[in-house]
Image (cartoon, grey):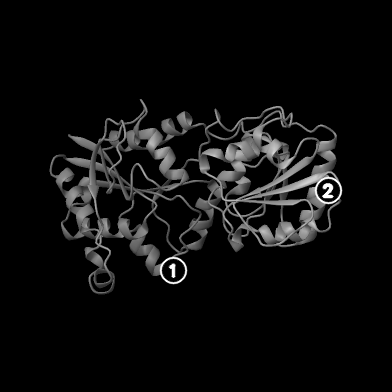
Amino acid sequence: MKKANVIVSEQSIPSHKNGSWTQRIEYYLESKNNIIDYVVCGKTENKLKSSSKFYNSKNKNSRFIRKFLPEKRYSNFLLNISLIIKKYDKIIVCVIDNVKLSNALSDYLDKNLLKNRVTLIFYSCGYSYFLNQKEHLKFSKNIDEIIFLTKSAYLFNKNLYNEFTPEVSIINNPIDKNIFSPIHRVGEDEISQKYNLKGKIVFLWLSHDRKKKGLSIILNAWKFLDKENSILLVVGAKRDVIIPNVIFVGQVESSNVHKYYKCAHIYLFPTLWKEGFGLSLSQAICSGCFSIAAKNGGVEDFFNKSDGILVQEPNIVENWVKAMEVALVEIQKDWKNHYSGNQILTFDEWNLKFSEIFNKWQKRR
């Protein structure tokens, strides 16, 4: 029986956007572990050094299409998938993080009586899509397996819906530990020099400036902290306010964020939404920061006691004040995490787990 492995993504691969899932998929497709035969994705002029064959597709996203002919939006993607199906007895297709695209493919398979020749995998890169029961039944109808980032995301979705029928695999997000690794903080690096951090205890908040990222909670907690010898670096936000011992850095290139972890002692992750995984938190842990994180979404799945403090009730400012005070004492006692990021996958470890899913379905008849 002739079979093929296929990845389907509305987003272009490689992508010009910053995104954790595009980075690991790009790394995978260029690695020796790559077993993907075809990639059907958005249009791009950029190329990967990959053994996979690429079908670049453009979605039809005009206002008229969205309003009157929504089923036509992904017709170019479906056309390319149909060309692949014709060449094989069976294909294993992984749709990445796009419910509408997955639904369009599912409808196409039903309409053309092709489901028996296609194994459909869905890679969920968040925590939940919070669909209603009817929407979930449509979404999951033809899905054979869902890949979740964490066990807690799987259990949440299993309990959310009356029916939950796909098989499940769980693969945590990976981190490039060649870049995000513990170092001895001597205060002589370029960030320390630029902001005069030598001899200070450095707190770090690093994220996009959205309400759900919890910066306001941290700024309010900071008012009650004894911060005589402490600095709070806020990376990713620029506020027109002056707060003692707070430095608003603003946006930085993703290629430079590791420099801020390396000069920080304490990392703050006050997420106020159901976090899919917590990329910046896992980077901070691997970088050896004492981490204070909200217990929200998938965070608890990879946060160990040795990593710092998990805040059970993150909407209460006093909880952050207390946690930050504990962190200050620990850092003053020369705290070290001797297991920094051991529980978090490397990119190569992630590659093997991703390949295992396709190999499993390849072996089934």
Q: Which residue is mark 1?
A: 132
Q: Secondary structure at mark 2?
A: helix
Report if residue 108 is visible in the image: yes
Q: Is residue 74 above or below residue 339?
A: below
Q: Earlier in the sequence, mark 2 or mark 1?
A: 1
The residue depicted at 72 percent of the width and 56 percent of the height is 218
Give SS at disc 1.
loop
| Residue designated by label 2 | 325
Q: Is residue 356 among what the camera can see?
A: no
Q: Is residue 313 left or right of residue 97?
A: right
In the orientation shown, which residue stands out farthest toward the left?
A: 86
Residue in the picture at 79% in, 49% down: 324
Frontmost of labels 2 and 1 is 2
The image shows residue 147 at horizontal and vertical percentages of 43, 46
In the displayed structure, 263 sits above or below 309; it is: above
Give the spatial CA distance, label 2 vs label 1: 42 Å
User: Can you give x and y, in whole percent of width and height, for residue 293 in the image?
Assistant: 68, 49
Q: Quadrant of the N terminus?
A: top left
Looking at the image, which residue sits at the far bottom? 68
**How many discs mark residues in the rendered view?**
2
Q: Disc 2 residue type?
A: Glu
260 displayed left or right of 187: left
